[in-house]
Amino acid sequence: MTNPLTARTVLVVDDDTLLCELLAEILTEAGYGVRCAHDGEAAWLEIQAASPDLILSDITMPRLDGISLARRLAETGSSIPIILMSSAVTAVAEGNGDVVRKPFALDALLARIARVFDDRDAASVGAAR
């Protein structure tokens, strides 16, 4: 039997390479497929190549910040959920965004990611009726 999480891919976007690698390792251990990008422009290219099921993105990054990435997704009509991360949460997520304050508890982050997928699954079931 296939683990349903393995079909779910999380794109981790953070210019902090060590944090990106740590999150990738933790999410992989939790059963998710993971891809990484180190700024919003690289993330946009990843999204165009193969849409992830969820984006976990830092807000403050070079070239294209997380809020601009969320805005670009919303402008294209994308339904990919995005969770934004920041050590200074002063900005409000736009469109389909959600903000997590750094540092965060890993178990709380994993629970939030699972909740996003549970909500999407429930919405899909409701839409199919």
Image (spheres, rainbow, N blue to C red):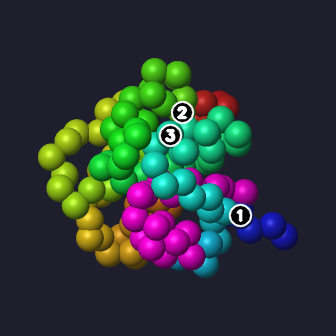
Tell whether 107 sits left or right of 42.
left
**CA gap, disc 3 and disc 2:** 19 Å
**Horizontal arrangement in the rendering, residue 85 relative to residue 14 (left or right):** left
> Tag 2 or tag 3, which sits nearer the N-term?
3
Residue located 42% across and 52% down the image = 57
**Mark closer to the observer (3, 2):** 3
Query: Is label 3 in a helix, a strand or a loop?
Result: helix
Report the disc number at residue 60.
none
Q: Which of the two residues, 111 or 90, is positioned nearer the viewer here?
A: 90
Q: Which residue is mark 3?
A: 41
- Residue 56 magenta-drawn? no
- Indicate which label's residue lies in the foreground, 3 or 1: 3
Tags 1 and 2 in contact by the CB under 8 Å rule? no
Q: Which residue is mark 1?
A: 6
The relative height of residue 108 versus residue 8 in the rendered view (above or below) is below
Q: Residue furthest right?
A: 1
Report the span colored magenta.
Answer: 7-25
- Residue 15 in sight here: yes
Query: How far across and down, in percent of the image, does residue 93 sit?
Result: 29, 39
- For badge 1, the amino acid type reads Thr
Pick whichever of labels 1 and 2 is earlier in the sequence.
Answer: 1
